[in-house]
Amino acid sequence: MSAAKPPAPAASALEELATAGVATVYEAYGRRGLLDAEWIPLQPGRRAAGPARIARCGQGDNRAVHEVMTHLLPGEVLVLTMPEPEPVALFGDLLATQAAACGAAAVLVDAAVRDSADLARLDYGVWTRWRRARGATKDERGSVNVRVEVGGTTVAPGDVVVLDDDGATAVAAADVTATVEAVRRRIANENGLRARWAAGEFSYDAYGLREADENPRPGVGT
């Protein structure tokens, strides 16, 4: 018997994760989930978080993107991949119009986009590996609603993807509630540290780094 599907995350949880941002979520999640690639945010300054709706396209082909649009739900992050990332445009203005009509929270393209000036004016964020005019074919169906690997992390349908100017990270659907709690603790701790540093204290001393550097143990750092 398969495990029960985790409940969809509450809108408030998604908002907290988006507001916290990629670096904080990644650290609070035990430095797990990072989609470790160079992402271009077409609208710098935008933050987003939502359950993943996934298309795994054929190589150089975007037929699966057209299919996944029929599954896309409001508030989801559309994740578009191929077996190997390459600068072929899987997503452009016309597909972006469909995603907007479906209520996408964001789009993450592990390939290229085109019509990037038009995409930069959207009401939702688009993150991409490349911007290229080179178009995709529509010969291979590909797969939708499947697990994919992006930037060294496996992302499953329904996992929460968080995006901002630092890149992208993912939280397994079953871990969202615990991660939100961990994010709150981390933010509270960082607020305390920020107040200490603003008052003139140095992290070099607070973390014990000065003492360790000035009084190294025998055989360590010498």
Image: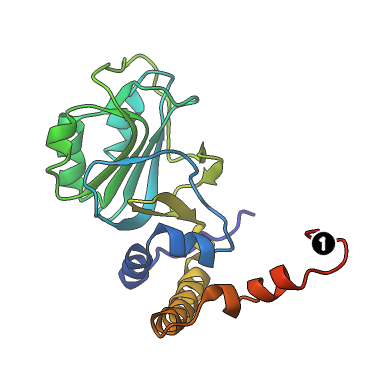
Can residue 159 be seen from the camera position used here?
A: no
Quick one: label 1, few (<14), some, or many (20+) residues within 10 Å? few
Farthest residue to the front: give it: 214
Residue 93: percent from left, percent from top: 16, 31
Q: How many marks?
A: 1
* Image: 201 above or below 5: below
Which residue is located at x 70 percent, y 68 percent? 213
Amino acid type of disc 1?
Answer: Val
Residue 148: percent from left, percent from top: 50, 38
* Image: 214 above or below 125: below
Which residue is located at x 47 percent, y 53 percent? 170
Q: How is the image coloured?
A: rainbow
Which part of the image, by quadrant, shows the C terminus? bottom right
Which part of the image, by quadrant, shows the N terminus? bottom right
Q: As rendered, which of 64 and 150 lies closer to the eye? A: 150
Left or right: 221, with 113 as reference point: right
Q: As rendered, which of 192 and 141 lies closer to the eye? A: 192
Which residue is located at x 31 percent, y 52 percent? 76
Residue 7: percent from left, percent from top: 44, 65
Which element is circle 1 on?
loop
Residue, disc 1? 220
Q: As rendered, which of 47 and 70 lies closer to the eye? A: 47
Among the 4 quarters of the image, the one containing residue 48: bottom left
Residue 124: percent from left, percent from top: 20, 49
* Image: 76 above or below 149: below
Can residue 149 be seen from the camera position used here?
A: yes
* Image: 108 above or below 95: below
Left or right: 211, with 197 as reference point: right
